[in-house]
């Protein structure tokens, strides 16, 4: 699941080597079945967008 270490790794990888990358969340699991998945995914995307504002996010 989403841990702070994983989020930090994602943020670091989005700008590694001075290259700005986009983020794609693939598969149905992040939005599947219960509201907790949706809330958690939205919270993570908010953090990514705050810390990496030029990142385009595809969901």
Image (tube, rainbow, N blue to C red):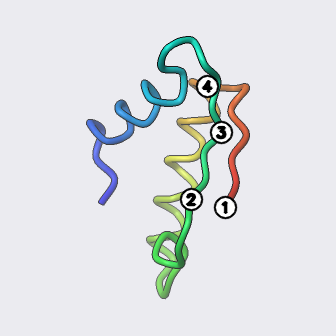
Q: Nearer the viewer, residue 18 or 44?
A: 18
Secondary element at image label 4? loop
Structural crowding at the residue carrying mark 1, measured as other residues with C-alpha within 10 Å and reported as few (<14), some (14–19) or many (≥20)? few
Look at the image and tell me in which quarter the N terminus lies. Answer: bottom left
Real-space CA distance between mark 3 and mark 2, rounded to the nearest whole angstrom: 10 Å
Residue labelled with disc 4: 52
Tag shown at residue 59: 1
**Looking at the picture, how far across and down is residue 10, in whole percent?**
43, 36
Tag shown at residue 4: none
Residue labelled with disc 3: 22
- Residue depicted at x 53% and y 36%: 47
Real-space CA distance between mark 2 and mark 1, rounded to the nearest whole angstrom: 5 Å
Q: Earlier in the sequence, mark 2 or mark 4?
A: 2
Mark closer to the observer (4, 3): 3
Tag shown at residue 25: 2
Label 2 near label 3: C-beta < 8 Å?
A: no
Describe residue 6's horizontal placement relative to residue 24 as left or right: left
Label 1 near label 3: C-beta < 8 Å?
A: no
In the image, farthest residue toward the top: 18
């Amino acid at each position: 699941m989403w841990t702070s270490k994983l989020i930090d790794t994602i943020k670091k990888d989005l700008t590694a080597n001075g290259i700005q990358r986009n983020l794609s969340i693939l598969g149905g699991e992040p939005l599947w079945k219960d509201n907790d998945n949706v809330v958690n995914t939205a919270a993570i995307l908010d953090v990514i967008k705050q810390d990496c504002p030029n990142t385009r996010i595809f969901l």
